[in-house]
Amino acid sequence: MSQYAPSPSPRPPRRNDLTFLVRPQNYQTINPATVLAPPFVAQYPSPETPLPELLRKGHHIAAANTAAALLIDPAQASVSDSARIFSLLYARFASLQLCGQTGLAARESRIFGDLSDSHVYRIEQDQDPVTSPWGQHLMPWVMRVMCVRLQAIGFGDWRRGIMQLFEMAREARWEVKRARSAKAEDQTADRQVSAQVWEERLADLGLSVADALVEVKDFEGAVVHLKSLLTGKRSSTVRTRLTLLFLRIGDVDSARRLCSDRKDSTATDLRRSQLLEAVCDTAEGKFEAAAEKYQAVANDATAEQDDGIQAVALQNMAVCKAYTGHLTEAQRSLEDLVEGEKSWSLRGLNFNLATIYELVADSERSKALKIELADTMKMHDEGDRALAEFKL
């Protein structure tokens, strides 16, 4: 090589081009009249309502539409402002799922392409010796987990999604190891928090993998995977998931054994176990015995302090009453729950009550009762409620 050969110039920093994320054709505007129950269409917010207010009040359809409008607005769009772009995208996709538009969110998530593409989503940090070997990912962690699931649905490829989750788990383990291996003098509060955050993320990924295995009908693999997580973080949640999975595949005996094997459990865990024992009775068609157990859980003086355990027990008890032919009692119990403070958090409550209305009244009368139910919910909750929720 000639001594006069020019020395190589330093490589310019890579610029992540996110132009493909702010194209108008990426996003579909949702017509609230085709999704929301009639009483909620009337209170659809004005276009000028700020996005944070829409999110706070639970106006998910308006939030999804507003987030998309802000993304594609030429006056506000900046392809170099990745934090803003992904913040709006997260609001868009989270809101779509919360208003029952998971299918649309899955189709739109295909615009991201390969989330592991370092040339698109990673920031080079060659000068930082302690950074991840992958480089910092532009997309927030919680959004990456969400998009892996949505893309698995959108592309119809859950195996690919599972592999992406394992790759993210490898990254999380590396981050935990990096935080733990720091010298004692470098063990600042920030670094300790970082280790805890990554450990929590790793535990959550374990549950996400189990969910993905269930989606591909690999129930045996999901059982084995969840059993491997029983001794780690989220052990109580893992035990609940495993119990419900056993019930889904028809292995009631294993579900019962798991309910009874709760050593050194907290009071909340024990009540949750009692609730799951009642679910086991329900799965076997023992509705009267299940109703009694649900009632016992609901009558527990401390159950009301738990995160929704009492309300779930009361709803399940009402469903059991319906299966045993006590429709009037079931209707009264569900209507009492609708009037309660926790009605907004009970999944399936409105659907179950709408089903009862269909059983106790003719078509015209049941429709009127469903609309009345929607009006009642509107008084208790400012947020959106979908047509399907009331079987309208």
Image: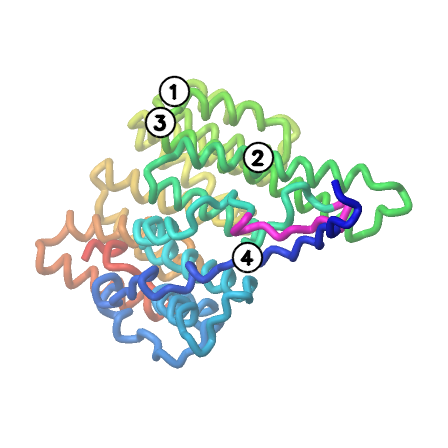
**Mark in front: 4 vs 3:** 4
Picture residue at 27% right of the left edge, 55% below the top = 389
Are there few (<14), some (14-19), or many (20+) residues within 10 Å of tag 1?
A: some
Based on the displayed image, in which of its 4 quarters is residue 298 positioned? Answer: top left
Is residue 261 shown above or below 175? above
State which tag comes first along the sequence, 2 or 4: 4
Give the magenta range.
Answer: 119-130
In the picture, the disc for residue 16 is 4
Q: Quadrant of the N terminus?
A: top right
- What percent of the width, then of the height, locates residue 134? 63, 42
Nearer to us in this view, 4 or 179:
4
Which of discs 2 and 4 lies nearer the camera? The answer is 4
Give the secondary structure at mark 2. helix
Label 3 secondary element: loop
Q: CA distance from mark 2 to mark 4?
A: 41 Å
User: Could you tell me how far apart the alpha carbons at marks 4 and 1 are, in whole angstroms?
Assistant: 50 Å
Q: Which residue is mark 3?
A: 217
Q: Tell me the CA gap for discs 3 and 1.
A: 15 Å
Residue drawn at 74 percent across, 49 percent down: 5
Sequence-wise first label, 3 or 2? 3
The kind of residue on which mark 1 rests is Asp
What's under tag 4, amino acid-wise? Asn
